[in-house]
Amino acid sequence: MSSLQEKLKTLPAKPGVYLFKGRAGEIIYVGKARVLRQRVASYFQKNGDLKTSILVSKLRDIDYIVTASELDALILEDKLVKKYKPRYNIALKDDKAYPFLKLTINEKWPRLFLVRRKENDGALYYGRYQGGMVRAIVRLVKKLFPIRWCKESPLKNREQPCLYARIGACSAPCVGNISTENYHQLVAGIKLLLEGKMAQAIGQLKSEMEKASKDKDYERAAYFRDSIKLLEKMLEGKADLAKTPAPLGLSELTELQKGLKLPAFPMRIECFDVSNIQGSNIVASMVVFLGGAPLRRDYRRFKIQSVKGKPNDVMAIYEAVKRRYAGSLSTKMDKPDLVMVDGGAAQVSFAGQALSEAKIKGIPLIGLAKKEELVYLPDQPKPIRLERYSAALKLLQRIRDEAHRFAVTFHREKRKKAFFG
């Protein structure tokens, strides 16, 4: 327990997701926090309930991922619970527990609410999310953009506004307090926020504040001013992530899944690279990114044994990939959602052969070639060209560069030992 208490001191005072691990290193609980250090510390208070006491008694280690905002933490928690199905999280038996957010842009006065399934009705759908989580997201979004809370469709005119309007949480279109044009500007801001475009969402709020100020509706202008401050605080957290050990890239991962048409959300990505000088001291590296952040405890280094005396990057890639997925690591580590290699068609071909021999099926494989930054896939004659400045490509470059850095560092260590040995 003392080692856990020491680890508590290293947790940042930032929003994020924490992962509790059991005796064998398995994830037994995933939670989200507005302030990681404060939330995790609360589990060790003496007045905890029976469930918390049992959970803490099984706890052996703590990992965490810092996020840009509490909203990002909510979404990441949902994805990690689905991926790992931790024993002490609420048991979710089927997809009914994972609802969507529905934004009814097909209505004159759009609404935002929870639904269990998608329909081809012209509305926008986001998710899936955990049930309790989606309600928290709805409350946060409507706090920033005060669209209506009522469920009726179409909206009926009223003589008196509801309680939400009286406390400033609804723009009250039912009594004519807002024009259709201005209401749809709020809806546009919600779309930007749910798509992860926080800076643009702030711009939308500023536009609404300026309109309210020109109309001398100072109470409404103050509401938007406070919403802007809240979002700007979230953005400050995003800017601070460069100083933290684990930045999050949920929007990048979503864009990557769409751009490469991946069958599953690429929560865990493993990337391989090779380093040598004219065939001497050949090594390979594997780096792991979880939720868009480096998971350094799962990094691995390989001394290449099958290639000696001359450079042969494709055979080195083949050996490293096969050792990862056919050797002891295959039972000790989680399977990735995406395998990546530094290189083009040849590297992808040899990595694919290694995966096949390791009897790994259903996990997508890609290669990222340095010169033109093209993405190569097995059995596809033409590579994919992602947008040059897209978040998806930047994520792949960051992972590839980290694998290269890790391989080069290991190669230098090995070469130094050989020189002085």
Image (cartoon, helix red, strand yellow):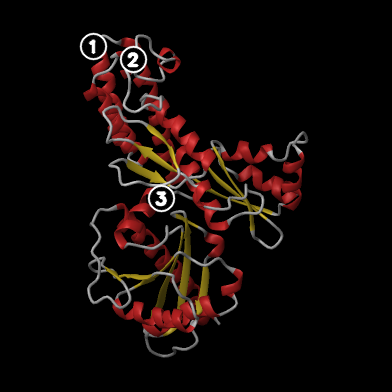
Q: Residue 374 location, x and y as percent?
A: 26, 67
Horizontal arrangement in the rendering, residue 173 relative to residue 43 (left or right): left
The vertical placement of 263 against 59, above or below, is below
Who comes first in sequence, dot 3 or dot 1? 1
Judged from the image, the secondary structure of the residue bearing numbered disc 3 is loop
Who comes first in sequence, dot 1 or dot 2? 1
Q: CA distance from mark 1 to mark 2?
A: 10 Å
Q: Which residue is mark 3?
A: 249
Amino acid type assigned to the residue bearing label 1 in the image: Asp
Judged from the image, the secondary structure of the residue bearing numbered disc 2 is helix
Q: CA distance from mark 3 to mark 2?
A: 34 Å
Residue 34 placement: quadrant? top right
Image quadrant holding the C terminus, namely bottom right
Q: Residue at x 75, y 37 (%)?
A: 49
| 285, 347: nearer the viewer | 347
The vertical placement of 342 against 7, above or below, is below
Q: Which residue is mark 2?
A: 220
Q: Residue at x 48, y 72 (%)?
A: 410
Q: Are marks 3 and 1 in contact (CB under 8 Å)?
A: no
Q: Residue 18 location, x and y as percent?
A: 58, 47
Residue 381 placement: quadrant? bottom left
Q: CA distance from mark 3 to mark 1?
A: 39 Å
In front: mark 3 or mark 2? 2
Q: Which residue is mark 1?
A: 215
Q: Are marks 1 and 2 in contact (CB under 8 Å)?
A: yes
The vertical placement of 220 against 239, above or below, is above
Who comes first in sequence, dot 3 or dot 2? 2
